[in-house]
Image (cartoon, helix red, strand yellow):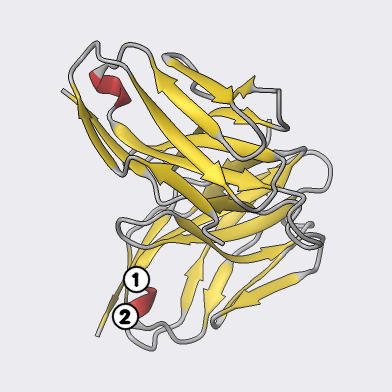
């Protein structure tokens, strides 16, 4: 039982390049989330998916797209990376995984992205 | 909208000191409240939670009580250890969305 996994762990991009961050969970959770964490700003929600087949914008969606590929996987894509997107990205999942976990989020280890 | 406010850090304590990190929230309805901990280079881990008013969450010597009358969920520990050094996030869950505070860094010195 790996929980929430993310790939890659580290990435360096040049301005204008594209990339996809991958996230998978093995807890049979319905909801999945993408956050970014910047110094002094806590976590900010980029996009979330309440269930397979649905996605919604969070607080800071501009410059990102997401795909809920199936119940397990939720990817985040940067089409044209900008230095302002330098951050640590966390994926999380929540819900329906057990009797006491329906409103608890479980986080992956993060992807540290630098855009030059 | 819903939001969480927690005390700014860093908080620096000596080993075995008493810890309080304040957290207040604004929310409609009946949110669940959480404390998460983040160690350097890692993701967030659930520390404790409370799902209704007057509930007390506890784990690893940490405690927090859901106070609806004061809209607070302060984190306490009676005797901190060096290994407790980390960033602590207060959060609430409401209608399938999470809202996080900005985090409080705790440094515990031996």
Which chain hosts label 2? B
Q: Quadrant of the C terminus of chain A?
A: top left
Which residue carries the number 2 mark? B82
Between residues B28 and B48, which one lies in front from this camera angle?
Answer: B48
Residue B74 horizontal/vertical position (percent): 59, 65
Which chain hosts label 1? B
B8 relative to B108 in the view: left or right: right
Residue B31 horizontal/vertical position (percent): 76, 48
| Mark 2 burial class by Cα count in 10 Å: few <14, some 14-19, many 20+ | some
Residue at x-position 73% and y-position 39%: B96
Residue at x-position 73% and y-position 32%: A51
Which residue carries the number 1 mark? B85
Answer yes or no: are tags 2 and 1 on the same subunit. Answer: yes
Q: Is residue B62 above or below residue A95?
A: below
Contact, mark 2 vs mark 1 (Cβ under 8 Å): yes
Q: From where the camera sits, is residue B3 visible?
A: no
Q: CA distance from mark 2 to mark 1?
A: 6 Å
């Amino acid at each position: 039982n790996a929980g929430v996994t993310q790939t890659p762990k580290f990435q360096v991009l040049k301005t204008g390049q594209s990339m996809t961050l991958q996230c998978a969970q093995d807890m049979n959770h319905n909801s999945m989330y993408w956050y970014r964490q910047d110094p002094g700003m806590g976590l900010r929600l980029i996009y979330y998916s309440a269930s397979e087949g649905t996605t919604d914008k969070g607080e800071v969606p501009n410059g990102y797209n997401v795909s809920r590929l199936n119940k397990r996987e939720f990817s985040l894509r940067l089409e044209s990376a900008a230095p302002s997107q330098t951050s640590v990205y966390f994926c999380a999942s929540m819900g329906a995984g057990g009797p006491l976990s329906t409103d608890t989020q479980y986080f992956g280890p993060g992807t540290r992205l630098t855009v030059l | 909208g819903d939001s969480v406010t927690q005390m700014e850090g860093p908080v620096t304590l000596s080993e075995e000191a008493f810890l309080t990190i304040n957290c207040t929230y604004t929310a409609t309805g009946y949110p669940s409240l959480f404390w998460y901990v983040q160690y350097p280079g890692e993701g967030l881990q659930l520390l404790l939670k409370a799902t209704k008013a007057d509930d007390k969450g506890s784990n690893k010597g940490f405690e927090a009580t859901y106070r609806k009358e004061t809209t607070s969920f302060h984190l306490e520990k009676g005797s901190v250890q060096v290994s407790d050094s980390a960033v602590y996030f207060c959060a609430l869950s409401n209608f399938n969305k999470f809202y996080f505070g900005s985090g409080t860094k705790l440094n515990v010195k031996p």
